[in-house]
């Protein structure tokens, strides 16, 4: 199928626009998809830190409660009694008696805790050999074959925290897997001097922390334990209540069955190595590892939240950007069509119509076209060519008329000579002299006319030769002009290549600026995020300051209560000595709390000052990044305009090259017509040369006739 110049220009341009639009759509989808994943990642990071802070806070609170009992004389006395017996025997009577003594000594504390908070204080004392001493929230210590018995059961096979405290003599904080699965531990050593008596801990409900961390209806938490710990977590071995996923994970906490499908085995396996995120069914899904007190990965915590609003916002942004880019491309295409049609296609159509008329022989055709560019120069050259062609044809016609007249005269003279010869042959001998005289007169006239005819034929032949020479010169000029047109086409093609390279360089520059703009946008987003985090840190520092103030007030009140208790104990005499000792210990603890609170308050004040300074620096950085982003945006706009001008120049030069090639083809057709005229001129010259030969032969016959007349006279 033959394509017109218009199609050759606009069809590739349209295809490029469509391909560019597709590439932009793919680019936007990729970048905005990364933005969605980055948002989910940020939420996952925040939730991971939040849950870790919950765990740390719960562990610290448990440790604080446990610390109330490590120095009580009643606790130490009970431990001394137990260690005087055989602690390796679970039902040793001395250990059992010490257990009862410890229950009686702390009963008042446990009842007060229960009355105030409405729940039992789950405090557990351990022996230094890894056995349970007493679980104070139970009446009896352990259950054997469905029967509760008061013994020192062995917990060393799964309570690594207790063994670690017994081995090192230091406190241990963190997560540990027990019989019921995950538990938060804050195990403190009980010492008398350098001697380790045992350890104590206050148990914290793991699931209650998870519920507190997922109060919102739009978020959901689930906990999965490594199945290799099932021999320890005996209460999780019922597969109907605690399903096993892929023989690798035990579903420990998953309150919503419908949302559990969001957490597949591949996600959980990746979550063992670190934070992993994805988007599924309008939910942002996050998984990250659970580490125990020794920093060993023992499970995965999965988190999902409704991100449909964020996804819808990203999709709307993608559609808006795509629509804007499409509109810009359509406007660019329409402007390009108008410019190329006005300044290239219309002039080329005018030149083509003129060339076609000249090629068909219409030398009277006129060309009304003015322009200062290469097309204007081409139009001027065509007009001059037609004028020269008209002049050459006119000269050829004039020479042809002269040759035709000379030929007619030669034919007439030849006929008269033949008639005279015939009459001389038929004349009688008597009239030979008269006839010879008359023939002599005729031969003289014939000789005169032959001489004139020969001169005219010579002139006509010379004119035909001159005409053929001029036509050859015209053909040579046409060839040179055609070569010039081809040279213009080649130069236009080279200019098109250079323009295309310029466009590519400008596009590369635009891509670099666009990438820089994207990077600055990401930097600005992260700076904004850091600024918000610093603001939150400042607010949290202020809240911590308030909490420190509350703790100081509580410590003051505790100190006063301890003093009052000491006074009342002193009034009670010997009966209140034990209580006086407890009150004194509480007072000392309150004083230590006040001192520690003061030090923490000073540290918090320094943190607040540093936070304010950091917020100011972050604000300055955000302003600088905004200015930089604005400058990069202006640079991108300038480069985009350069790309548009380069594309317009490349398209215009390409169209000119195509037009020059078509004009070259028209010039070749005209050159062929001139070659035909040259051939006609050569034929005319040959005819004149033959006529010259005929006239020469006629002159020879006249000479012969003169000799015959002389013979007749003699």
Image (tube, helix red, strand yellow):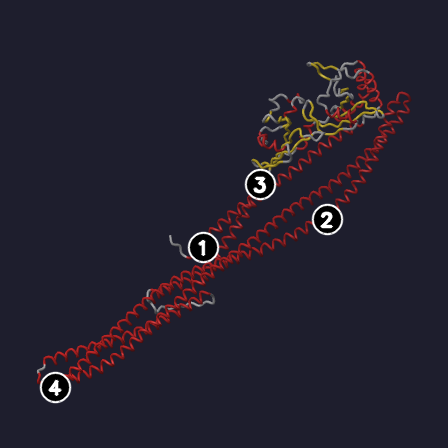
Residue 203, given in percent of the width and then of the height, sits at 73, 25
Q: Which mark is residue 434?
A: 4
**Secondary structure of residue under mark 2:** helix
Pick whichever, 459 or 346, lies toward us.
459
**547 in relation to 658, above or below:** above
Label 3 sits on residue? 311
Label 1 sits on residue? 10
Q: Earlier in the sequence, mark 4 or mark 1?
A: 1
In the picture, measured across the screen, residue 266 lies left or right of residue 146, that is left
Q: Earlier in the sequence, mark 4 or mark 3?
A: 3
Label 2 sits on residue? 617
Q: Earlier in the sequence, mark 3 or mark 2?
A: 3
In the picture, measured across the screen, residue 427 lies left or right of residue 57, that is left
Q: CA distance from mark 4 to mark 3?
A: 131 Å
What residue is shown at x 9% (from left), y 80% (from top)?
426
Q: Earlier in the sequence, mark 2 or mark 1?
A: 1
Q: Quadrant of residue 47?
A: top right
Assign the C terminus to one quadrant of the image: bottom left
């Amino acid at each position: 199928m033959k394509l017109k110049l218009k199609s050759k220009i606009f069809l590739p341009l349209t295809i490029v626009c469509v391909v560019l639009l597709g590439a932009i759509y793919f680019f936007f989808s990729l970048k905005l998809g990364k933005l969605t994943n980055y948002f989910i990642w940020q939420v996952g990071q925040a939730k991971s830190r939040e849950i870790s802070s919950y765990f740390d806070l719960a562990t610290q609170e448990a440790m604080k409660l446990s610390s109330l009992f490590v120095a009580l004389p009643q606790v130490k006395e009970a431990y001394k009694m137990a260690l005087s017996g055989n602690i390796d025997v679970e039902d040793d009577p001395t250990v059992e008696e010490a257990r009862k003594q410890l229950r009686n000594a702390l009963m008042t504390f446990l009842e007060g805790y229960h009355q105030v908070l409405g729940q039992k204080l789950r405090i557990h004392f351990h022996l230094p050999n890894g056995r349970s001493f007493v679980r104070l929230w139970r009446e009896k210590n352990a259950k054997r074959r469905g029967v509760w018995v008061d013994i020192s059961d062995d917990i060393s096979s799964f309570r690594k925290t207790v063994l670690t405290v017994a081995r090192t003599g230091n406190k241990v904080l963190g997560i540990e897997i027990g019989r019921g699965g995950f538990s938060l531990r804050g195990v403190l050593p009980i010492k008398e001097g350098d001697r380790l008596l045992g350890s104590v801990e206050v148990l914290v409900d793991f699931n209650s922390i998870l519920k507190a961390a997922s109060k919102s209806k739009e978020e959901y938490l689930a906990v999965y334990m490594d199945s290799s710990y099932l021999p320890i977590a005996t209460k999780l071995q019922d597969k109907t209540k605690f399903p096993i996923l892929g023989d690798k994970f035990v579903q420990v906490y998953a309150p919503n069955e419908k949302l559990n499908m969001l957490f597949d085995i591949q996600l959980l396996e990746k979550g063992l190595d670190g934070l992993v995120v994805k988007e599924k069914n309008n939910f942002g899904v996050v998984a990250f590892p659970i580490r125990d007190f020794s920093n060993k990965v023992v499970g995965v915590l999965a988190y999902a939240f409704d991100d449909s609003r964020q996804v819808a916002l990203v999709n709307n942004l993608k559609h808006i950007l795509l629509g804007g880019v499409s509109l810009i491309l359509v406007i660019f295409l329409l402007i390009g069509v108008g410019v190329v049609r006005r300044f290239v296609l219309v002039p080329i159509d005018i030149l083509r119509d003129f060339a076609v008329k000249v090629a068909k022989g219409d030398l009277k055709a006129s060309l009304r076209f003015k322009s200062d560019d290469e097309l204007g120069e081409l139009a001027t050259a065509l007009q001059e060519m037609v004028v020269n062609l008209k002049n050459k044809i006119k000269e050829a016609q004039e020479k042809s008329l002269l040759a035709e007249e000379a030929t007619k005269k030669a034919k007439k003279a030849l006929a008269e000579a033949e008639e005279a010869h015939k009459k001389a042959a038929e004349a009688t001998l008597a009239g030979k002299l008269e006839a010879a005289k008359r023939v002599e007169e005729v031969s003289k006239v014939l000789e005169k006319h032959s001489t004139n005819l020969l001169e005219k034929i010579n002139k006509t032949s010379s004119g035909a030769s001159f005409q053929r020479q001029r036509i050859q010169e015209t053909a040579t000029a046409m060839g040179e002009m055609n070569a010039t047109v081809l040279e213009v086409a080649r130069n236009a093609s080279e200019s098109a290549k250079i323009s295309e390279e310029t466009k590519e360089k400008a596009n590369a520059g635009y891509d670099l600026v666009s990438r820089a703009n994207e990077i600055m946008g990401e930097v600005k987003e992260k700076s904004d995020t850091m600024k918000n985090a610093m603001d939150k840190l400042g607010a949290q520092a202020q809240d911590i300051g308030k909490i420190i103030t509350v703790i100081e007030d509580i410590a003051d009140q505790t100190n006063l209560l301890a003093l009052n208790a000491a006074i009342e104990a002193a009034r009670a005499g010997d009966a209140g000595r034990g209580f006086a000792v407890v009150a004194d210990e509480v007072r000392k603890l309150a004083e230590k709390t006040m001192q520690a609170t003061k030090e923490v308050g000073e540290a918090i004040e320094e943190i607040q000052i540093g936070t304010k300074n950091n917020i100011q620096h972050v604000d300055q950085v955000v302003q600088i990044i905004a200015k930089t982003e604005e400058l990069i945006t202006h640079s991108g706009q300038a480069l985009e305009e350069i790309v548009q001008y380069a594309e317009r120049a490349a398209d215009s030069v390409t169209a000119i090259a195509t037009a020059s090639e078509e004009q070259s083809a028209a010039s070749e057709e005209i050159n062929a017509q001139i070659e035909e005229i040259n051939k006609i001129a050569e034929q005319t010259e040959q005819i004149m040369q033959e006529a010259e030969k005929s006239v020469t032969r006629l002159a020879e016959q006249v000479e012969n006739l003169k000799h015959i007349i002389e013979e007749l006279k003699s």
